[in-house]
Amino acid sequence: MDLGPDPLALDRQVCFALSVASRSVIAIYRPLLEPHGLTHPQYLVLLALWEKSPRSVRDIGETLRHDPATLSPMLKRLEALGYVTRRRARADERQLEVDLTDAGRALRAEAEKIPYKVVEELGMSVDELESLHAALSRVIAATR
């Protein structure tokens, strides 16, 4: 594979483009999440819980590709905000289960507006974003 005249040119690096794009897109989310007291990683936890709740901390970690030590402070903060509860699983006391509160479930209706605002801010078509998502999903699958 020929990478051109300089294989180390910064503007040709996939890692650089992904890093800048990631920070830029997350920056779009910041003002949308701030009124709810949420960070982007906390929002991702809520997205996982809106798909299926309750979930074990292990399940959330596997879904988001986070280790439990990273999740623990996020879950504590979400609990302090009143969006989730944490409790020992009845079936297995060793597992910590996370469930949405009524406030956490109600927040979903407000959060449904967020993807539309992000698409608008990006100024890209839904088709372009779906193609990008598909390409990124292939990258994720290739790096597991």
Image (tube, rainbow, N blue to C red):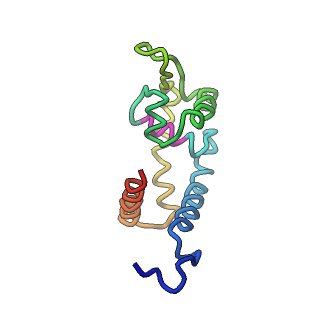
Indicate the position of residue 64 as horizontal and vertical percent values.
Answer: 47, 42
In the image, residue 92 sits, relative to residue 51, either above or below, namely above
Rendered residue at 53%/71% (across/down): 13
Looking at this view, is 90 or 129 the one in front?
90
Q: Quadrant of the N terminus?
A: bottom left
In the image, residue 144 sits, relative to residue 77, either above or below, namely below
Indicate the position of residue 128 as horizontal and vertical percent values.
Answer: 39, 66
In the image, taking residue 80 as reference, residue 94 lies left or right, namely: left
Rendered residue at 46%/54% (across/down): 116
Most common SS among magenta residues: helix
Looking at this view, is 1 or 11 the one in front?
1
Magenta part of the protein: which range? Answer: 43-50
Name of the residue lying farthest toward the bottom:
5
Indicate the position of residue 105 as horizontal and vertical percent values.
Answer: 47, 30
> For residue 56, what is the image quadrant?
top left
In the image, residue 99 sits, relative to residue 37, either above or below, namely above
Rendered residue at 48%/25% (across/down): 99
In the image, taking residue 38 as reference, residue 107 lies left or right, namely: left
Name of the residue lying farthest toward the front:
1
Looking at this view, is 1 or 81 the one in front?
1
Rendered residue at 61%/51% (across/down): 30
User: How many numbered circles does the render carry?
Assistant: 0
In the image, taking residue 50 as reference, residue 38 lies left or right, namely: right
Q: Does the magenta stretch include residue 46?
A: yes
Q: Is residue 96 magenta?
A: no
Indicate the position of residue 9 as horizontal and vertical percent values.
Answer: 57, 78
